[in-house]
Amino acid sequence: MKDDLYLAGKPGTDEVMLGNHALARGAVEAGVDVVTAYPGTPSSEIVEALNEVSLAQGFHSEWSTNEKVAIDVASGASLVGARALVAMKSAGINVAMDTFVTMPYGGVKGALVIVVADDPDAHFSSTEHDSRPLARQAEILCLEPADAGEAKEMVRQAFDLSHELELPVLVRSVSRVSHGSANVTLGPIRRDETNPAFNKHYGFQYRWNVYGPPGTRSKHEWLVQQFPKLEAYAERSPFNDLKLTPGARIGVIAAGLGSAYAYEAIRRLGLDGKVHWLKLGTAFPLPTEKVSQVLENSDKVLVVEDGTNWVEGLVRETAQRIGSMCRISGKGPGEAGEAMPLWGEINTDMVVRALAAVAAVELKEDEARRQLKVQLEGGVCPRSSTLCAGCPHLGSYWGLRLALQRYRDDVHILNGDIGCYEQAGYGIFAENLFSGDDSHLWKAQSVYEMLDTIYVMGSALGMAQGQSLADYKGGKVVAIAGDSTFYHACLPAVANLAWNGGQVVFMIVDNRWTAMTGHQANPSTGLVGNGSEAKRLDISEATKALGVEHVLTANAYDIKTVKSALDQAFKLDGPVALVISGECRLQMIRRERNMARPTTVVDPDRCNGCGLCLRFGCPGLGLGPDGKKVQIDQIQCNSCGLCSQVCNRAAITVQGGTH
Amino acid sequence: MSTTNVIVAGVGGQGSILIAHILGKAALRQAAKASRTVQVRIGETYGAAMRGGKVSSHVRFGDARAPLTMEDGADLVIGLEPLETLRMSIPYLAPEGTCIFNTAPYMPADVKMGRAEYPDIDGLLTGLRRLGRQVISLDATGMAQELGKSQVMSVVMLGAASATGALPLDQDILMDTIAGEVPKGTSDLNLRAFSRGRSLAENLLGTGASS
Ligand SMILES: Cc1ncc(C[n+]2csc(CCOP(=O)(O)OP(=O)(O)O)c2C)c(N)n1
């Protein structure tokens, strides 16, 4: 990221900027005071950028331990008058939900802007969750940008809106906006000091206390009374654009990124200037007046949006209210011919097909080309993702595999949490795997087939405890989580395990970084978000303090220690925590750039091509040109030495350097 | 105004994101030079910090609004890795489109573990030639290594692409943008890489030194 875009970028100039950097720039232009976030793809670059410039710009910016904590810190700041921003990925808003729906009861004094980056198509997420309906749940405004340029402007204006409406404002991005780039026109940077002040009865009594007299219900009544102001804003918002075309009988209502696809689809079909057009930047509430005008002037309306059919539902509500007979279609089955399914993301081609169906335009198909493509697709082989060369998680998994060999006929349950280590559940090459049998034994061929369950952050341990407490005795019950995940959502689960019991081995794979989302700092790192040094918290001590009796440790880069700790753990009675340490190899190399790097070599006389090390799964290893013996890819190899511990024939050695 | 659509296909760490951003920024400069406005859109998916996954970018400029190219819509595919070039060309390469093809494979884990077979490069090229109008294949990885740094492979490819006529961007604007975007201290090397790629493609096309 380039600092100059934040500090020296001249107002009025256009830049091609990443959506997430544009969202960050919007906050800087608005004079943000406090920034919080928990990283999560595709949102992480927003606060990565703000962390980087925070010291120079004089605001507080942090990685918080989770999204609930992040929204609480930002909310607290807004109560004393600060302009606060909190950012997260789609899953994060679920973690923050309790505060998210309660906070609006008293509203804000400074400003609170909540940016959530959804992930239609689940490129990097556990679900395709759509955050827009949550704005209705919380009874607040939701803005939805079409691209980076609008994203910057929306965040900037959201601060003023939040202050004016005295309510949090939700800005909903999606992967293609956050990780896409577009023209962004830079604006001036606001620099005025906020003097924090606190008044317990600000505006109305017991403002910041939902239980304060006369009670919670009256706070909700206040919130409901604010809604007309939100509706009035939606009607005048510069982000909603209505163009009625005299004589047209078809309307297109397109929200956020959907409007970018719809803009191009309309032109592709030659329908520019032949349909009514309503581009929406407010996903809640809708500008009902404008929507009504489109409905009243159309026989058919197509709603285009990325995510669920949220806006379509709101358009239908308006139609019902005004008694419109207009035929409305959008996602899923209907007049748009199911061109835009209710899962996955949309694109211009899908919108073209949907609009062609609604407008009865015929599309040409090139059958020969279609067949050529089917034929060529047959020759495309998959590229499964893997852990990095030298990843400490490889050592932890190999130790686990060795320890479980003694119980090889049992059906163990390995519950994976969320982080790089979840790769051990991604599988290699899609084979047709299905069996209705109970307690079926599947032999994992590589580390990538080891994990049995994966859901969301913090759930592995509770799941494992449930399996144990349900009296599952078919095999060992294991949960695996990383350091960032440990501090994010495992602490209550550890307390529950210590308290309610369960025969569970909980492996905490501590690589010291929140690695998967781009190596952010967490309490295990020894740094805070802006790069300053901080106290390094100790996971073993934390598990002991929470009451786990058996706490073991091991070194991920020394597989024997992992195996022997697990041998012990599997024999102990009651819950066991095993903390396996080993820093993310990429981070270690980045820091110790000048370290003399050892070289890993294979002795071709000793290698018999048994393939054991290939099942270990390090991408630095592969079969050589003869297809018989293993070869090290020296560009990828990070010289960690793990593979030399895996080989039974001592064919792999690490030479020279310090490792 | 028409829109130029480019796809940069590759594997994490090969530089597809850098090339996409050079193109996007150069398009903005090109328009500024002619006192025109241009809408630039770059669409990417990248997620996990892990290396070696598929990474491809869509770069679009002109009257662009959407982050993704339409099916059969790419005027140019810059293919940094053979398998990924094929994967992205099947849906996107236009029948009239150009494909720049780096011949050096980056083996997927599936192949390394012996659980899949890497497609045959010649067969793959034949397929590409049926999909688009022209395919220029070169060993850009080898050229980059000769230049002293395998990381400049993507810039060799950009140089080759600039010679084909599929990119409505001036050579000097591209070169200025490269110099501004690559890591400090590497701009000379990158500009040499650009020129090497460009002259190789010019020779293959028999166009000689044109700009
Ligand atoms: C609620 C929620 N917030 C954020 C994320 C994004 N996320 C995915 S993996 C991950 C990192 C976990 O780090 P750690 O547990 O230390 O494992 P590592 O990747 O370092 O191995 C995060 C934050 C998520 N999936 N869910």
Image (cartoon, rainbow, N blue to C red):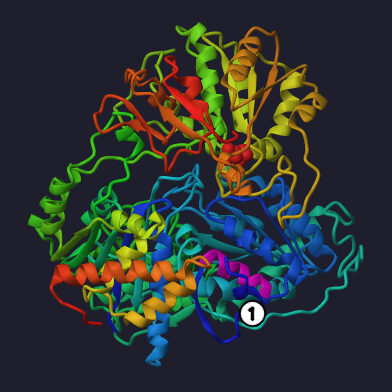
Q: Look at the image and say whether residue A587 sits in the magenta stretch.
A: no
Q: Quadrant of residue A630?
A: top left
Q: How many marks?
A: 1
- Name the residue located 59 percent from the left edge and 75 percent from the top edge: A5
Main SS, magenta residues: helix
Q: Is residue A597 left or right of residue A73?
A: left
Amino acid at the residue labelled 1? Ala
- Name the residue located 63 percent from the left edge and 74 percent from the top edge: A6
Q: Look at the image and say whether residue A22 sits in the magenta stretch.
A: yes
Give the residue at the far left of this rendering: A368
Q: Quadrant of residue A479?
A: top right
- Name the residue located 61 percent from the left edge and 19 percent from the top edge: A562
- Give, as a single range, the part of the protein colored magenta: A19-28
Q: Pick whichever, A656 or A154, lies toward us.
A: A656
Q: Quadrant of the C terminus of chain A?
A: top right
- The correct choice, above or below, for A645 with respect to B56 in the image is above
Neighbourhood count class around disc 1 (C-alpha, 10 Å): few under 14, some 14–19, many 20 upward = few
Q: Is residue A371 left or right of residue A54?
A: left
Q: Position of residue A565 (x, y in %)?
A: 65, 15
In the rendered structure, the residue with mark 1 lies on which chain? A
Q: Pick whichever, A235 or B1, lies toward us.
A: B1
Q: Position of residue A460 (x, y in %)?
A: 59, 29
Q: Position of residue B91 (x, y in %)?
A: 23, 56
- The correct choice, above or below, for A147 with respect to A66 in the image is below
Give the residue at the far bottom of this rendering: B35
Q: Pick whichever, A321 or B127, lies toward us.
A: B127
Label 1 sits on residue = A8
Q: Secondary structure at mark 1?
A: loop
Q: Quadrant of the N terminus of chain A?
A: bottom right
Q: Position of residue A569 (x, y in %)?
A: 65, 13
